[in-house]
Amino acid sequence: MQRKEGNGEAIARNLLEMSKLKVPTICIVIGEGSSGGALAMGVGDKILMLENAVYSVLSPEGFASILYKDSSKSSEAAEQMKITAKDLKELGIIDEIINEAQGGAQNNEEQTYSNVKKSIIKHLKALKKLNTDTLLEQRYQKFRTIGQKYVKFEKDDI
């Protein structure tokens, strides 16, 4: 009998395999990072975002459809979801916000490319100093603690 695997299994396998990579991983959200791809990016040793990008595991339209039963309320949903680079940095989900040209990356692509390059080099230099065991343990701990600043559970809640 042939085994049927769906998207959930593929995402889980990707998370597992990425978590075991013995080289530094730097993930950069440059536009809209969402759905299963957003989950995969969470396993990066460093998660960086362009300042005007958004990052979440569910689209605001999907969230609004679930929460409000009305996808037209996506703006309200996006605000509640905290999907901007600024929000995610404050929550400790991303590591750095990469500045864009005034008015957006498209207004000066070369400046944006230069800013991205500088950020990658900075983080890669720091990550390369770690031995493999330390790199893997830090990655594991980082992934396990994502969102703890946002959601606090009391012992009695569980």
Image (cartoon, grey):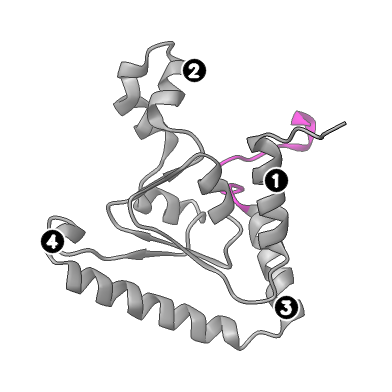
> Secondary structure under badge 1?
helix
Closer mark to the observer between disc 2 and disc 1: 1
Circle 2 is placed at which residue position?
66
Q: CA distance from mark 1 to mark 4?
A: 38 Å
Q: Position of residue 110 (x, y in %)?
A: 18, 73
Q: Position of residue 141 (x, y in %)?
A: 70, 62
> Secondary structure under badge 2?
helix
Quadrant location of the N terminus in the rendered image: top right
Q: Which disc number belongs to residue 134?
A: 3
The residue drawn where x is 66% and y is 52% is 14
Quadrant location of the C terminus in the rendered image: top right
**Quarter residue 135 falls in:** bottom right
Residue type (three-letter) at the residue carrying disc 4: Gln
Q: Which disc number belongs to residue 102?
A: 4
Query: In the image, which residues are magenta?
Result: 146-158
> Secondary structure under badge 3?
helix
Horizontal arrangement in the rendering, residue 45 relative to residue 89 (left or right): right
Circle 1 is placed at which residue position?
12
Mark 1 in CB contact with mark 4 (< 8 angstroms): no
Residue 149 is inside the magenta segment:
yes
Horizontal arrangement in the rendering, residue 41 relative to residue 104 (left or right): right
Sequence-first disc among 4 and 2? 2
Main SS, magenta residues? loop
